[in-house]
Amino acid sequence: MTKRFKAAAVALSLGLMALGFAPSAKAQEPYWQCVTFARMYSGIEIFGDAHTWWSQAQSRYRTGARPQMGSVLAFQSSGRMSRGHVAVVSEILTDRVIRVTHANWGGSRGKVEENVTVVDVSANGDWTAVKVWYDPINDLGTTVYPTYGFIHKAALQPTGGVLLAAAPTSSIGQP
C-alpha cells in the first residue's frame, strides 16, 4: 500500500508540475514601461504617456536642449512610437553623443537597457533629432527620432529666482 501511495503522490506531483503549479526556479522579472522606469530612475515625478512629459514639465521642471546627467530625454510621438518615449541620461560623451538608460525599447520589450548610445543628428545640434544604437545590427539604427529635449531634475524657480515662503502663523497670543 505504501508503494502505491508513494507512486500516486509522485504522479500527482508530476501532474501538478505539468499544469504549471510547480514553483518557479526564478522569480519573474518585472515588465518595465519607459515612463515608470524613467520616473523611478530619474526622480522626475511626471505621470502619463511619454509624449505628454514635455508639456507637463514646462510648468514644473527646467527643460533645455543640452543633456545633463540624470535628465530625461523626451521623444516625440512618431511612427510606431505613438506614445513617445523617455530615457534617462546616464553618461555624456561629447556635445552630440550621450548614453541613456531606458526601458521597453525596440527588441527589448519590457526590459531595461543600460548605457545605450544616442547621437544628436539634428542640423542645428539642438538634440531635436537623434539616432539610437541598435544591438541587432551592432550600429546606430537607421531611424531618426524627433525629440523635444531634456527635462532636468531641478524644479523651476519662480520668476527672478526669488523663492517666496509664507510667514509662519501662530495662534498663540492672538486675540
Image (cartoon, rainbow, N blue to C red):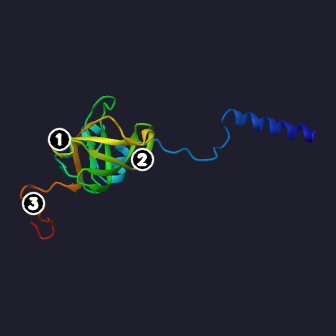
Q: Nearer the viewer, residue 7 or 122?
A: 122
In this rendering, the label closer to the viewer, 2 or 3? 2
Which tag, 1 or 3, sits closer to the chain's start?
A: 1
Query: Circle 1 is placed at which residue position?
Result: 123
The residue most toward the bottom is 173
Task: Name above or below for residue 159 compared with residue 7.
Answer: below
Marks 1 and 2 in Cβ contact (< 8 Å): no
* Total numbered badges shown on the rendered structure: 3
Crowdedness near tag 3: few (<14), some (14–19) or many (≥20) residues, C-alpha within 10 Å: few
Marks 2 and 3 in Cβ contact (< 8 Å): no
Q: Nearer the viewer, residue 65 or 50?
A: 65
Give the distance between the C-alpha atoms of the residues marked 2 and 3, in whole angstroms: 37 Å
Crowdedness near tag 2: few (<14), some (14–19) or many (≥20) residues, C-alpha within 10 Å: some
Q: Quadrant of residue 145?
A: top left
Residue 30 horizontal side relative to residue 15, left or right = left
Q: Secondary structure at mark 3?
A: helix
Q: Amino acid at mark 3?
A: Gly
Query: Circle 3 is placed at which residue position?
Result: 161
Q: Secondary structure at mark 1?
A: loop
Q: Which mark is residue 113?
A: 2
Quadrant location of the C terminus? bottom left
Q: Quadrant of residue 23?
A: top right
Which tag, 1 or 2, sits closer to the chain's start?
A: 2
Give the distance between the C-alpha atoms of the residues marked 1 and 3, in whole angstroms: 33 Å
Give the percent coordinates (x, y) of residue 119. 28, 46
Give the percent coordinates (x, y) of residue 103. 40, 44
Q: Amino acid at mark 1?
A: Ala
Task: Name above or below for residue 5 compared with residue 43.
Answer: above
* Residue appearing at x 30%, y 42% in the figure: 47
Which tag, 2 or 3, sits closer to the chain's start?
A: 2
Give the distance between the C-alpha atoms of the residues marked 1 and 2, in whole angstroms: 27 Å
